Amino acid sequence: MKKLFIIFLFFGITSTGFGQLKSRTFEEVDSLLQIQKQKIIVFIHTDWCQFCQRMKTTTFKNQEIIEKLNTDFYFIDFNAEEKRDITFNNQVFKYKPTGNNVGVHELALQLGTINNQIVYPVLCVLNEKNEIILQYNNYLSPKDFKLLLEKLKE
């Protein structure tokens, strides 16, 4: 009986996302902001970007970062080549093809364009009113990302 209880406890903890980064959708964040105001961190990336993939396997696997993001922010993991329509901030954004099997989402361009270009990965931080307060387009190590989160929390 004791072993059975431990097994259920283990599966209960692991299935609730213990230690996992909680990624939201733009639509979820719109609803959540009505309940609790928090800053939004949008990680804009592509599947082919090496620095994006490196951030996913290092920075976003760091337990301290996961805890801070899950507790203090709304986090959105956003593929810039997402093909579905996204409604955010009372506006509909669409995927825009730019060639054969190539394109970019309007929302990625809206949030990730810096100096008239988009360079991946992009971190875009929005305040509680969905206004851009920070854009950063470069790889961030776990150490640097922790510093950024501390500054944003102030």
Image (tube, rainbow, N blue to C red):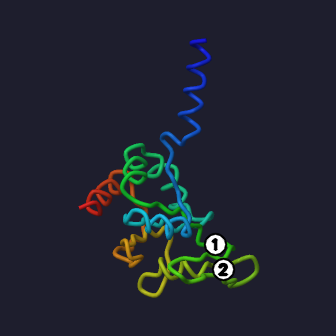
Precedes in sequence: disc 1 or disc 2: 1
Figure quadrant of the C terminus = bottom left
User: Callout 1: helix, strand or loop?
Assistant: loop
Examine the rendered structure and indicate whether residue 113 appears above or below residue 150: below
| Image quadrant occupied by the N terminus | top right
The amino acid sitting under disc 1 is: Glu
**Outermost right residue:** 100
* Mark 2: amino acid: Tyr
Q: Residue under circle 1?
A: 81
Q: Are marks 1 and 2 in contact (CB under 8 Å)?
A: yes
The picture places residue 92, in percent across and down from the top left corner, at 60, 82
Residue at 51%, 45% in the rendered image: 20
Residue 26 is left or right of residue 154, and the answer is right
Instruction: Please tell me the numbered disc located at residue 55.
Output: none
Residue drawn at point x = 42 percent, y = 71 percent = 124
- What residue sits right under mark 2 in the picture? 95
Q: Secondary structure at mark 2?
A: strand
Q: Of 124 and 6, which appears nearest the observer?
A: 6
Identified at 62% across, 78% down, the residue is: 104
Residue at image coords 31%, 60%: 148
Residue toward you, 30 or 148: 30
